[in-house]
Amino acid sequence: MTEAESTAVNPTQALSGAGQLTNIGDTMLKKWHTLRARIEHLNGSQPWGNDEPGKNFNKSYMDGAHPPCTSVLEGGESMVVALSKLGEQIREGVQGVVDVDDLTAQWFKR
């Protein structure tokens, strides 16, 4: 790789960004859990009614092999959980590269 093709990362800035992303992810996860609990509560009270149209809606929305309600909530959960872990994964990656660089510098002192 030529110098023009190399990539350099400022570890201090990358670690700072990873920390910010971790904080944002934690906040998103807390807000998601609050929102999900609210949605589940509302779904439990069947706000669309207990008449025939309401029962038909419930059958299509909440029941069956792959009900949309559950699929949306589980999909949202998966995305938010993944985002909440991203900052820590970036921190671990950056720190690992810094540690390898430090070790290599010790081995090959100029």
Image: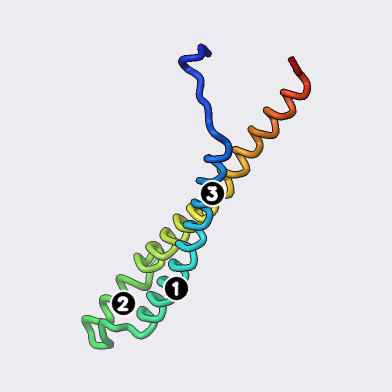
Mark found first going from the N terminus, 3 or 2:
2
Quadrant of image for the C terminus: top right
Q: Residue lying farthest left?
A: 53
- Nearest the eye: 16 or 84: 16
Q: Secondary structure at mark 1?
A: helix
* Residue 95, image x, y percentages: 64, 39
Q: Give x and y (percent) for residue 79.
A: 44, 55
Instruction: Decide: few, some or many residues near mark 2? Use Cα within 10 Å; few <14, some 14-19, many ≥20.
Output: some
Q: Amino acid at mark 3?
A: Gly
Q: Position of residue 72 (x, y in %)?
A: 37, 63
Who's the residue at 44% across and 68% down the image? 31
Separation of disc 2 and disc 1 at Cα?
Answer: 23 Å
- Mark 2 lies on residue: 58
* Residue tagged 3: 87
For the residue marked with disc 2, what is the amino acid?
Asn
Q: Residue at x 74, y 28 (%)?
A: 103
